[in-house]
Amino acid sequence: MAELRFHALKQTLERVPIYIEEKERRSSIFGANVFNESTMRQYLTKSAFNEVMDAIVKGSKIDRLVADHISTGMKEWAISKGATHYTHWFQPLTGATAEKHDAFFETIGEGASIEKFGGGELVQQEPDASSFPNGGIRNMFEARGYTAWDPTSPAFIYGTTLCIPTVFVSYTGEALDYKTPLLRALQAIDSAAVAVCKYFDKNVKKVNASLGWEQEYFLIDKALVASRPDIVATGRTLLGHSSAKGQQLDDHYFGTIPNRAMSFMRDLEHECMLLGIPVKTRHNEVAPNQFELAPIFEEANLAVDHNSLLMDLMHKTAERHHFKVLFHEKPFAGVNGSGKHNNWSLSTDTGVNLLAPGKTPMSNLQFLTFFINTIKAVHDNEELLRAAIASASNDHRLGANEAPPAIISVFIGNQLTKVLSELKNVTSGKLSPEEKTELKLNVVGKIPEIMLDNTDRNRTSPFAFTGNKFEFRAVGSKANCANPMTVLNSIVAKQLIDFKAEVDVLIDKKDMKKDDAVFNVLREYIKKSKNILFEGNGYGEAWEKEAEKRGLSNNKTTPEALKVRVSKKVIDLFEGLGVMNKIESEARYEIEMEDYVHRIQIEGRVLGDITKSRVVPTAVKYQNTLIENVKGLKEIYGATFKTVAKEQLRLIEEISSHIESINSKVDKMTEERRAANHEENIETKALAYAYKVNPMFADIRYHCDKLELLVDDELWPLTKYRELLFTN
Ligand code: ADP
Ligand code: MG
């Protein structure tokens, strides 16, 4: 067997699970490495503690002198836990997390030294980070980028480093990261939602967006991954014939977790507990070697940080267990890909989940207000929501008959569909007392506190209401949740602002009572956004046709999907809310388009390389064996050899024909790539990659995969699907 493949398999088969002992209860170690509320009480003066809490709850600024106290307390705590370094931890637009470590250690002359960490170092840093994507922002102004402390996400110790969550902005204040726009969007939805809540409860002072993500991933032995240059370079297999057994038998889904994977999970969960990531659920997913991990939901900013941290933690923990974690949305053709459902809701500081039906008609009217406004927001911005989940890798998943389509729609279930259709008929203008009583008692009041609608389990919807939250399912497994969360919270914030303005007009100018006005506006919203509601099979072809009739967008590739981000409507939306200015929107568009181009470019190069330097030479080698065989048969049988060598001759020709196709197609793909690279305009370039380069991959793969079946298994150089997916 090809040496690399053989050794990879041998190593994998010899592995034994690492025993993970959990000595303490999880609840007793939860958050042990986090500078959380209880630790702060211990290490900070009362006034410093109060100031941090105010910053967290009210978003107030922290005084520079107080920052000195905070940093000292933080340092003492960190050193007591064995930390030697500190870092500003941020999320640049590369998709990974970034950190640059500095030691607490400092010399103070005459051979003496101390551990030091001042307020200045806590609050702001200037990492030399000029190589992060910035979409031209820093070229235009100054090359400097700053990181600034985000007190709403607690500092934590990772290894021996104190990590301080920060935003990353340019000298002129433009966001260069995922967190900055998210924080601004969360602020926007807070104030917009509080204003609407006041119709129902004057005591509400703060509304938090919550996020509970569900992370899917593949776990593959690291030796097997190392034997596949395509996975190493691109995160997915660019070729490989599907295994005879895939996921047909559904025997992996929710099955017993394999021992090595279980050890990995327990180790990971232990680390999560220390870091205060409240992981709760683990199980096998549909595809072989595919798993899912989900935490208890948290405030959205913290949840986003925790997801980024978790992804990093997973890579590091996997290393100890000789695994590689694949976060790519589609690492293997023919079996399911991975997503990251984003469960989202809004909750008040009075403890009310605004997307959960309540006990009284009034609380249900509040629920309906937020529910219908969310639907309207998605209706008006479906294309932007699609853009928020666009990436080269997620393109493989959307619409691939296993994942939500590239069409955004909202699923709400039977019960709520009925409620909306009744509300649609509410009288225009002031409501009679009888109608209002009837509505409150029999429509709004009849919404059960707990939704027991079985049809809630429609798995094909990209955006589904699941009883007390919406579940945005089309998010990619590799994505940073900040982007979809920024978009979702922004569009709902904008919608709530518009809603309040419309209701206020009816109250002030038309002399309507508050609930008459609310019913009137909601009625119109239901009518206007009916096209986004879809309860059927989202995977079916019929839906594509229907969606087209309804005027919904169906942007299948990332370059098409992203375009809306630089439309006037979207730029104005973000600018109006203070989430992103025009420069930031345009920069992000450019960065994402470039990322798309680079990903496809790398895939093209790797594919060309593997096919020419591995697949074709192996096929030739096998063909030579066949030729030798035919020569031998000729020697023995003389003139009649063709009858006995018939199959061999056919194989020789078949191999030649595949080699010919591969070579010509790889050459064509390379030419297309060159042509695309010459395009100056990023849109033209990305479209060329999407429509000229990318489609050639499948053609090339087809012939390689055919060769895989023809060529002697002993010679085949690439670890096969059955080995990648079923060895553990
Ligand atoms: P599944 O989609 O796997 O069937 P669920 O629908 O029960 O599972 O979703 C569970 C996820 O929803 C968990 O990650 C949980 O934290 C999250 N979740 C539950 N309530 C909320 C909420 N109010 N806001 C945000 N996320 C929530
Ligand atoms: Mg889910």
Image (tube, rainbow, N blue to C red):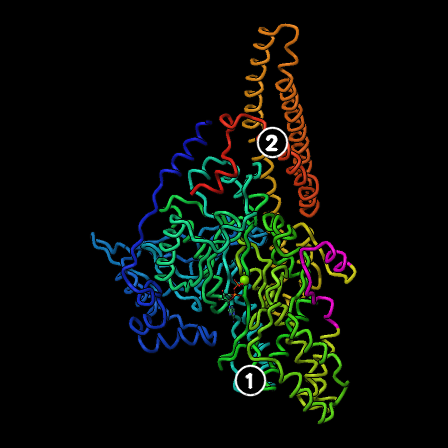
Q: Quadrant of residue 488?
A: bottom right
Type of amino acid at the residue the image marks with label 1: Lys
Residue lying at 25% horizontally and 56% vertically, measured from the top left: 108
297 part of magenta stretch: no
Residue 150 in the image: state x and y as whole percent: 45, 66
Q: Secondary structure at mark 1?
A: loop
Q: Quadrant of residue 22?
A: bottom left
Type of amino acid at the residue the image marks with label 2: Cys
Q: Which residue is mark 1?
A: 359
Residue 33 in the image: state x and y as whole percent: 33, 62
Q: Is residue 720 above or below residue 521?
A: above
Q: Quadrant of residue 463?
A: bottom right
Quick check: which quadrant has ligand 2?
Answer: bottom right
Residue span colored magenta: 528-548
10 Å crowding of disc 1: few (<14), some (14-19), many (20+): some
The response on whether ligand 1 sits within 8 Å of label 1 is: no
Q: Which mark is residue 704?
A: 2
| Number of on-image labels | 2
Horizontal side of 676 relative to 217 (left or right) equals right
